[in-house]
Amino acid sequence: MSEWKLNNYISVDCVVFGFDFEQLKVLLVDRVLKDEKTGNELFSDLTLTGNHIYEHESLEDAAARILFDLTGLENIYLKQFAAFCDPDRLKRPNDQAWLRASGRDPNSRIISVGYYSLLATKNVTLKWKGRNVKWYPVSEIKDLAFDHYNILQSALVALRRELLYEPIGFELLPEKFTLSQLQKVYEVILGVNLDKRNFRKKVARMKYLIPLDEKQKGVAHKPARLYMFSREVYEKTRKEVLDFNI
Amino acid sequence: MSEWKLNNYISVDCVVFGFDFEQLKVLLVDRVLKDEKTGNELFSDLTLTGNHIYEHESLEDAAARILFDLTGLENIYLKQFAAFCDPDRLKRPNDQAWLRASGRDPNSRIISVGYYSLLATKNVTLKWKGRNVKWYPVSEIKDLAFDHYNILQSALVALRRELLYEPIGFELLPEKFTLSQLQKVYEVILGVNLDKRNFRKKVARMKYLIPLDEKQKGVAHKPARLYMFSREVYEKTRKEVLDFNI
């Protein structure tokens, strides 16, 4: 069926960030090239999760398809953040060998459009085309195949910016959460330690953060008050939020 | 020279916004298709300014080249905001006819990466490949060729967001300016009227906006105080600005 033909020059790379209250992680896949004759491993490294688009498919649909193949989850928040097309993005020796071995023209120009996503790692079961896909701490990644290290860094900047201006952090929390949990979301994603008193002063201004008449249960320490995020209040006060920054 | 071969499937579209203290404008080009035999005009519409990339060229270089060809200006602020690749983005009858007439495969998939730029219209002299390129008020544009109306709307959202979070408005002002001029920048780009008192309260918080011991000269009304923008102070207080939004 010609509809299911992959486009050779347009791909999508998904930077799937994972949050576990300790570290910010990212989904990476093993790329192992073996010698065709001897079967010996020539090299092994890591890539982001991505794929070429199908001829009939939009970029968004391709990104959603990759994420569904990886996690079995649908309707996941995915955000396009940049397109990558440097003339030398596929020119390192490993990348050239990989392209040749998989029957592709190593000199062709391929544009990749980056999407990032943010998940709580505990909600996700991974599987992907029989390949080895795992969570890696972002802070420990020093290089990746192709230009994927560059794509990852660019996604990280975009994610942090988004977190500062949009209420995306709440997607990582249970429906009812404590302010300490909320602070941890900001600390882990921004990669900083925040002063507790300043943080509480700032969140006190978030009208969409609703204090509940409920406290934590079953904790060893003094139970903290629970809060909820109201998207309705957020949407209504949004204009004001934007206005505030002028 | 093979280096100067255009890539057939990757293009860049520049949304060049122009500001003149009255309206937000955008640069558009006439697209006129004539019947090959009779010379009669088949249709005439408008497109953004764009081009395919050269095989050796990065996306950024292609966007800068287009802007230089248009205005003769170098080192213009250009920001990538999104990639456009819907399967039906070139499928309307006029677009199909245009592609066929210019010898291109009307069924090929072309991805376009959007860049926007913001200029004071009075600084710009236009010229482009002998084609008719002009400033049009953004508010009066109802449709464009290809998916360019969609690209324009997406650029407008990105520009407004950028204006709220980054000091890009100052690029449009003279070195020394009044608060009324600054307010006009925000009003024209955001497409809103701002309350003068509220606006002044907000700008009073911008530490990088430096009041000078100088007033306007040669104006009929009471001369207003002049201000300057300090990029140095902005960079130093930037962390704080971001922090403020948490």
Image (cartoon, coloured by chain):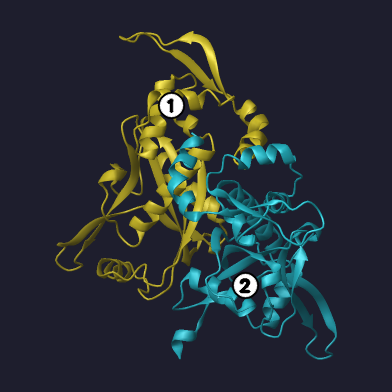
Chain colours: A cyan, B yellow
Marks 1 and 2 in Cβ contact (< 8 Å): no
Which numbered circle lies on residue A50?
2
Q: Are marks 1 and 2 on the same chain?
A: no
Secondary element type, mark 2: strand
Left or right of B246, for residue B6: left
* Image location of residue A101, percent across then percent down: 70, 82
Local crowd size for mark 2, using a 10 Å CA cut-off: few (<14), some (14–19), many (≥20): many
> In this orientation, does residue A193 appear?
yes
Q: Amino acid at mark 1?
A: Asn
Local crowd size for mark 1, using a 10 Å CA cut-off: few (<14), some (14–19), many (≥20): few
Q: Quadrant of residue B217?
A: top left
Residue that numbered label 1 is attached to: B198
* Image location of residue B102, percent across then percent down: 32, 66
Tally of marks: 2
Left or right of A74, for residue B99: left
Q: Amino acid at mark 2?
A: Gly
Which numbered circle lies on residue A21?
none
Secondary element type, mark 1: helix
